[in-house]
Image (cartoon, grey):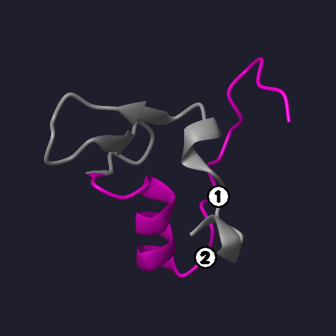
Amino acid sequence: MEGRGNPNCLRCEHFKITWDPAFPRACLLFGFKGRSLPSAGVFQAAGRACPAFKPKPGLKD
């Protein structure tokens, strides 16, 4: 979903990998937990890109 303007959750400070095999990806800020990236859930619910994306400190482009 990144192609639609959604940020890459893997580069977001709020993204977390969980130990739950059924719901391996999570957003700590919104409380989303699922199989797809949380930004896809935000896009599906709100119809726009995630407004809370915050790049992880120290990441380089």
Q: What's the amino acid at mark 2?
A: Arg
Q: Position of residue 18 (x, y in %)?
A: 27, 31
Question: Which structural element holds mark 2?
Answer: loop
Cα gap from disc 2 to disc 1, whole angstroms: 8 Å
Q: What's the amino acid at mark 1?
A: Pro
Q: Position of residue 19 (x, y in %)?
A: 20, 28
Residue under numbered circle 2: 48
The magenta stretch spans which residues? 34-61
Main SS of the magenta segment?
loop
Tell me if 57 is positioned left or right of 48 in this view: right
Q: Residue sitting at 45 percent across and 40 percent down?
A: 29
Asked if residue 21 lies in the magenta stretch, the reply is no
Question: Which structural element holds mark 1?
Answer: loop
Q: Residue sitting at 41 percent across and 48 percent down?
A: 30
Q: Nearer the viewer, residue 20 or 27?
A: 20
Question: Which of the 4 image quadrants contains residue 10?
Answer: top right
Q: Residue sitting at 68 percent across and 72 percent down?
A: 3
Q: Position of residue 21 (x, y in %)?
A: 15, 40
Question: Which of the 4 image quadrants contains residue 26?
Answer: top left
On screen, residue 45 above or below 28: below
Residue under numbered circle 1: 51
On screen, residue 18 above or below 33: above
The answer to the question of whether label 2 and label 1 lie on touching residues, with beta carbons closer than 8 A, is yes
- Determine crowd level at label 1: few under 14, some 14-19, many 20+ residues with C-alpha closer than 10 A: few
Q: Residue sitting at 86 percent across and 36 percent down?
A: 61
Q: Nearer the viewer, residue 22 or 41?
A: 22
